[in-house]
């Protein structure tokens, strides 16, 4: 029996140590960059909505850079007081809610009951179920830009994958990796394509045909990759095992219906954010509140007392605290580079390098710029405000359309979110799945390479047909 089945959500010591070591090495590397890379900044002006974007006319200038050693040491704590820290605090609060509720669901037996019913219903057609689950998660990323909001569902899919005879890696790939793929295809992702097109002066979600083609091709690649892996490690689900699954429990059935109805209502609200723009800034809050409500109601309906609910929820919050430290350390890398004012310098050097390249390769270089900057700035909309004013004029100089530039931006932002250890959602999900970053790297790097080849080919195809 897996650790997930024994005691709800816990972050293993091995996974925690692996992640901490990787992140600390990156922290040291970021500090060394502040020593050897001079400080610099682009002039910025507010756009019509008050967002700060780069002023191309005034351009770039060098400034005094660097960061004091003491500030670097304390950066995991100082990042909480930095400008724009609201999202970071929301992610941490979001994670604590997940930890508390999942532990309660596990203790009252509702998680085990839900998984058993699913295995009994779909065990004979598990690969069809895999295809549907991956399509669902990809659609969430591509259509409404959900990413962090999907984290509460990752442990459920991981536990389901294990019960269906696969492993935790399969479950993470079916959920979080699929979301990242959808996010990158960006069919009508408001946080990448939407913001980027607005900044570039294009109609919202225009030129969707190439992004829809990307979605189909990427989905096919993802399903084939995960299915081949699952086939290698799968365990058969015997008829005798299905017969041992517990009979129907009316009380748990009622609790499960409550959980799915409340959580489903929250997902519908998130889906509607694609049309009701005022909801887009609150999707994470909506998911957290609805998940909290679903967990409390369903556990009480299942027969757990309010006192036991409080105790188990608190133990779940405590068990998830190591993930908070990982998130703060990962977030401190961007903080360090911003405080030392070297991010703009790196970007300025990259833009200058593009001028020496052949025209056809510039679109791939733009893709590379976004991939590199995504390591330091996981937020898609924040990257858009930083990069679009620079990469769009660069593309136009070489006769590359603005639409294709937006596709390159979306691709560069999405896939690496589920590969870079600086992304909080990835760290949380790996911790909840009791999977070390090293193990995930070994599993996913091949897919990342294949995906990089595929998306590069799509960009070159777009260039060839004049997209």
Image (cartoon, rainbow, N blue to C red):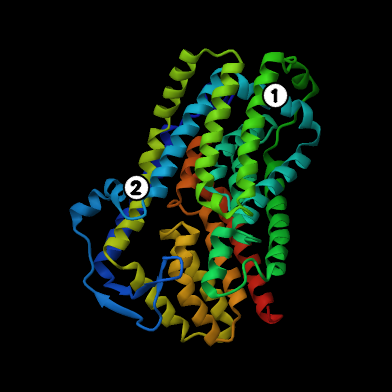
Crowding around mark 2 (Cα neighbors within 10 Å: few <14, some 14 to 19, many 20+) is: many
Marked residue nearer the N-terminal end (1 or 2): 1
Seen in the picture, residue 411 relative to 59 is either above or below; the reply is above
Q: Which residue is mark 1?
A: 116
Left or right: where 381 falls relative to 43? right
Q: Give residue 317's quadrant in the image.
A: top left
Cα distance in 3D space between marks 1 and 2? 38 Å
Q: Position of residue 114 (x, y in %)?
A: 67, 25
Q: In the rendered image of this protein, does residue 465 appear above or below residue 452?
A: below
> Along the line of sight, which residue is nearer the eye, 81 or 65?
81
Which image quadrant: the N terminus?
Answer: top right
Q: Residue at x 57, y 23 (%)?
A: 297
Residue assigned mark 2: 329
Residue 55 in the image: above or below residue 66 = below
Is label 1 in a helix, a strand or a loop?
Answer: helix
Describe residue 232's horizontal placement relative to residue 200 as left or right: right
* Residue that appears at 62% across and 61% down: 186
The reply to whether residue 9 is in sight is yes
């Amino acid at each position: 029996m897996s650790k997930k089945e024994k005691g709800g959500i816990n972050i293993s010591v091995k996974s925690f140590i692996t992640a901490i070591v990787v992140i600390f090495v990156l922290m040291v590397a970021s500090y060394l960059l502040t020593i050897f890379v001079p400080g610099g900044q682009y002039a910025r002006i507010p756009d019509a909505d008050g967002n700060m974007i780069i002023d191309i006319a005034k351009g770039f200038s060098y400034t005094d850079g660097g960061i004091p050693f003491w500030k670097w040491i304390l950066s995991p704590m100082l990042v909480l007081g930095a400008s724009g820290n609201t999202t970071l605090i929301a992610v941490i609060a979001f994670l604590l809610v997940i930890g508390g509720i999942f532990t309660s669901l596990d203790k009252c037996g509702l998680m085990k009951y839900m998984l058993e019913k699913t295995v009994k219903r779909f065990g004979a057609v598990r690969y069809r179920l895999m295809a549907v689950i991956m399509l669902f998660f990809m659609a969430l990323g591509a259509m409404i830009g959900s990413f962090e909001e999907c984290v509460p569902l990752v442990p459920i899919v991981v536990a389901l994958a294990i019960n269906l005879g696969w492993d935790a890696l399969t479950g993470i790939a079916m959920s979080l990796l699929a979301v990242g793929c959808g996010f990158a295809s960006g069919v009508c992702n408001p946080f990448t394509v939407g913001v980027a097109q607005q900044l570039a002066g294009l109609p919202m979600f225009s030129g969707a045909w190439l992004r829809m083609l990307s979605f189909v091709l990427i989905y096919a690649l993802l399903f084939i990759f995960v299915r081949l892996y699952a086939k290698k490690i799968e365990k058969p689900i015997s008829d005798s095992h299905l017969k041992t699954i517990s009979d129907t429990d009316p009380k748990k059935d009622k609790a499960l219906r409550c959980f799915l109805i409340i959580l489903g209502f929250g997902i519908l609200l998130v889906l509607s954010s694609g049309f009701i723009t005022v909801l887009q800034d609150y999707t994470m809050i909506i998911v957290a509140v609805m998940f909290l409500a679903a967990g409390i109601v369903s556990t009480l309906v299942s027969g757990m007392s309010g006192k036991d609910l409080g105790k188990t929820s608190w133990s779940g919050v405590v068990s998830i605290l190591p993930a908070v430290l990982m998130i703060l350390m990962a977030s401190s890398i961007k903080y360090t580079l911003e405080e030392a004012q070297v991010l703009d310098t790196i970007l300025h050097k990259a833009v200058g390098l593009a001028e020496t390249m052949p025209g056809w390769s510039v679109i791939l270089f733009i893709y590379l710029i976004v991939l590199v900057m995504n390591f330091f700035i996981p937020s898609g909309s924040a990257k858009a405000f930083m990069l679009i004013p620079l990469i769009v004029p660069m593309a136009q100089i070489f006769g590359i359309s603005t639409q294709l530039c937006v596709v390159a931006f979306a691709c560069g932002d999405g896939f690496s979110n589920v590969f870079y250890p600086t992304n909080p959602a990835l760290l949380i999900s790996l911790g909840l799945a009791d999977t070390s970053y090293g193990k995930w790297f070994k599993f996913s790097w091949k897919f990342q390479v294949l995906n990089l080849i595929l998306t590069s080919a799509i960009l070159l195809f777009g260039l060839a047909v004049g997209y």
